[in-house]
Image (cartoon, rainbow, N blue to C red):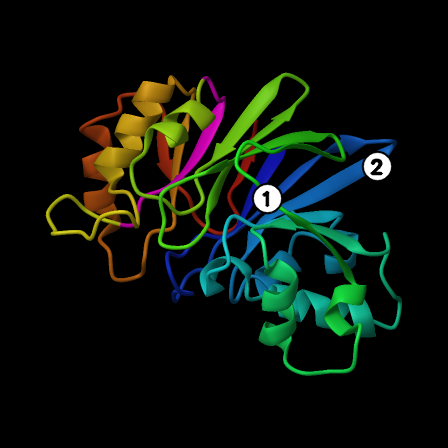
Amino acid sequence: MKLTIIGCAGSFPGPDSAASCYLVEAPFEGRTFRLLLDLGNGALGPLQRFTDVRDVDAVAVSHLHADHCFDLACFYVVSRYHPGGRTHGRVPLYAPAGSDRFLARTYGPEPDPGILEHFSCHDWQDGDVVQIGPFTVTAVEVDHPVEAYAMRIECDGKVLAYSGDTGPCEQLDRMAAGADVYLCEASFVESSVNPPHLHLTGAQAGASATAAGVGRLLLTHIPAWTDRAEVEADAKSTWNGPLELVDTGAVYEV
C-alpha cells in the first residue's frame, strides 16, 4: 500500500495543511485503486496534486465532523459537473449512519436525487469488515462525542491502522494490534487540562502504539495552535519505536 498525506490539520484547516484526508493506493485488477480515508474541509484542493479527483474509487469516513467529511460536497461538484464525467461511476461511501442525509444538507437543497445520485452510501456498524477493492477494511467504534470509527486497512499481508478521532479506549488498541503503520491522532498535549472522550495526547497515542505492538507510529490531526515539538516529546515518553509527525505531501510505503 502507498499512503499519501493529503490533509493532517486537527479540527480545522491550518495555514500549512487542510483538514484530515489520507489517500491509500494499491494495485487492483491491472490498475491503481484509490481509497480516501476522510475528506475534511480544504482537502479537495491539495488532493488534486496527487490524483485526478475523478479517479478516486471509494471514500471511507471516520465520522461526520466538518474536518473529516465536508469536502465531500465539493467532491460531488466535480463528479456531477466535470466535462469529462466520472471515471468509475457512483462513488462508494462508507460512513456512520445518516451520511446520506448529512451530505444532502451539507450541499444544500436541490431537486432529488441530487447528491445521492453520485454516492452509494454504506453505513458503518461496529466490527464491520468490508472489501473495498484490494483492501479489507475493519471499522471499530471508538470514543468521540459523535458516532466515530477507527479503521484497520489490510492488503497483501500489510496493515495500516487509522485512529480517526478518539479518546483513549481499549478497542483502539485492539484495532491497531500488530499494524505495520499506525496513523494516529494526537490533538492534545499533556501539559493542558483536556476534556475527556474527545482526543488523544501524544503520550496517549504513544501508549496505544506500544500496547498494540505496531511497527511505526505516524502522528496526525495536530491543530495549528498546538506545539508540534511538545506533541512529539509527549509521544516519546510512552513510545520508543519509529515516530513521525506527518505533513501534507508525505508518502509512506506500508
Disc with the residue nearer the chain's start (1 vs 2): 2
Q: Nearer the viewer, residue 73 or 243?
A: 73
Using the rendered view, name the quadrant where residue 156 is placed: top right
Q: Could you tell me how far apart the alpha carbons at marks 1 and 2 are, in whole angstroms?
A: 27 Å
Mark 2 Cα-neighbour bin, 10 Å: few <14, some 14–19, many ≥20: few
Q: Tell me the mark number nearer the camera, choosing from 1 and 2.
A: 1
Residue 193 painted magenta: no
Residue to which mark 2 is pinned: 31
Badge number at residue 45: none
Residue at 46% over, 50% down:
147
Which stretch is magenta? Answer: 178-187
Residue at 55% over, 60% down:
69
On screen, residue 71 above or below 20: below
Q: Element type at marker 2?
A: strand
Q: Looking at the picture, how far across and down is residue 90, in whole percent?
A: 82, 56
Residue at 76% over, 35% down:
133
Left or right: 186 with respect to 121?
A: left
Three-letter amino acid code of the residue under disc 2: Arg
